[in-house]
Amino acid sequence: LSLSSLYLHLNLDFSLPVCLLCRNNIIYSNVCCVYVCVHRFDYQELLHNSSFCLVPRGRRLGSFRFLEALQAACIPVLLSNGWELPFSEVIDWSKAAIIGDERLLLQVPSITRSVGSDRILALRQQTQFLWDAYFSSVTKIVLTTLEIIHDRIQTHMSRSRLMWNSLPGGLYALPEFSSDLTLFPFYYSTLGKSPSQEFTAVIQAVTPLQSQQQPIFKLILAVAKSKFCAQILVLWNCEKPPPPRNKWPSITTPFSIIEGKRKTMSGRFFPHQAIITDAVLSLDEDSVLSTNEVDFAFIVWQSFPDRIVGYPARSHYWDSGKGRWGYTSKWTNEYSMVLTGAAFYHRYYHHLYTYYLPTSLLSMVDQLANCEDILMNFLISAVTKLPPIKVTQKKQYKETMMQQGSKASRWADPDHFAQRQSCMNSFTSWFGFMPLLHSQLRLDPVLFKDQVSILRKKYRDIERL
Ligand SMILES: *[C@@H]1O[C@H](CO)[C@@H](O)[C@H](O)[C@H]1NC(C)=O
């Protein structure tokens, strides 16, 4: 084969980065290279197996090998003097690639050998983050381009370099939210910030108040007793106007009612100005929680401020028979969602839910009056690449919900479940992948269910329930 027909045949760029990978650090001629690397080895596997991938200039300064290496978590070793790397205006490539000097080609082996294993791991992790955040699809590339232009125009609220170069990346860190990095859930450890000591409880109310026996009364009293509770907000989503303050439980914790201008399911995650604390405790009006449970879940959230932490959990699975995702409320050892009827998360997710997600998904949720909690879990897992966190088992939760069987209880509706299945599939197709991740972790208080006196336990009520 002549050189050119060989390239044509294999559809390869003129300069192959794989040359140096062919062991022994021998730089073969291009022909050898094609033979040795492409025919004797599986190219993709070779990329994945390698720590470093040479990216010399191709026909132009840039080469497709660069993105290929990035995708495969192979640290690109760039040999293309004068090449402006993609999005270099915001991306710090020195954290993910080695930028060599093409005139000093023969020094490359010693340079790569001098990189320690910790740095190799850090560089490889950064390749994966950057690939996934900005290059993994045409949509991401276009969005990144637009957001960089947006940052250039709106300089007073452009993203900082930290936002672009650390998880979850610039596309998920909306500068409209704040220019203060400490107000986002992602940078606590980088900035050495400790999570706040207070939360805002946001209760979604959909049934009119008739008696003091209604679960929402007990719930408000239990939550108000938590020493971490800064305020309680009731999102009043009933047709009837809310009852006057004196009809509500008398508590000293600041209490306010927000009348839903948006009487919709997505409205419960609207970033209301009134929510001033970083932590939000999201509650359904019929959730049954004790003060101890609230306190314990909040303490856990403080350790995981970027995740959703809560009680009732659900799971997803791949239904191979139907070729689609399934939703299950079966009690197994695994979960991938935490219901927002009793969960803590950072208030930034209200902002992201309302302004990042497309109107198509939000209106789907509103029309069905269902799935808003699934969508929130999708969003948070897509951002963090981590599963939610479940705290202490609470067997009563399900039963109490069922017993009530009130008209308002949407769980009683048989369509409800089927809708949730189809929501999962619509959400997955918008995200382009299934962001939910399974977890088997459950966090319980110290001495939970241990055979010791209840007096020695800090969260006594959790077991008494
Ligand atoms: C990749 O690594 C695996 C495991 O070490 C090895 O079996 C395989 O042959 C390697 N593949 C290539 C192309 O080097």
Image: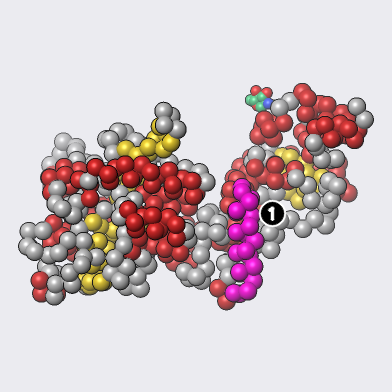
Report the predominant secondary structure element of the magenta stretch: helix
Residue 253 falls within the magenta-colored stretch: no
Q: Quadrant of residue 363?
A: bottom left
Q: From the top left corner, tell me how far across and down residue 339 is, in percent.
A: 30, 49
Q: Nearer the viewer, residue 54 or 131?
A: 131
Q: What segment is highlighted magenta in the picture?
A: 134-155
Q: Horizontal placement of 94 versus 344: left or right?
A: right
Q: Horizontal placement of 17 versus 149: left or right?
A: right
Check disc 1 and report the residue beneath it: 94
- Residue at the limit of the structure toward the top, as seen here: 40
Q: Is residue 174 visible?
A: yes
Q: Quadrant of ligand 1?
A: top right
Q: Horizontal placement of 27 versus 390: left or right?
A: right
Q: From the top left corner, tell me how far across and down residue 58 is, in percent.
A: 83, 46
Q: For numbered disc 1, what is the local secondary structure?
A: helix
User: On the rendered image, what quadrant is the N terminus found in?
Assistant: top right
Q: Amino acid at mark 1?
A: Ser
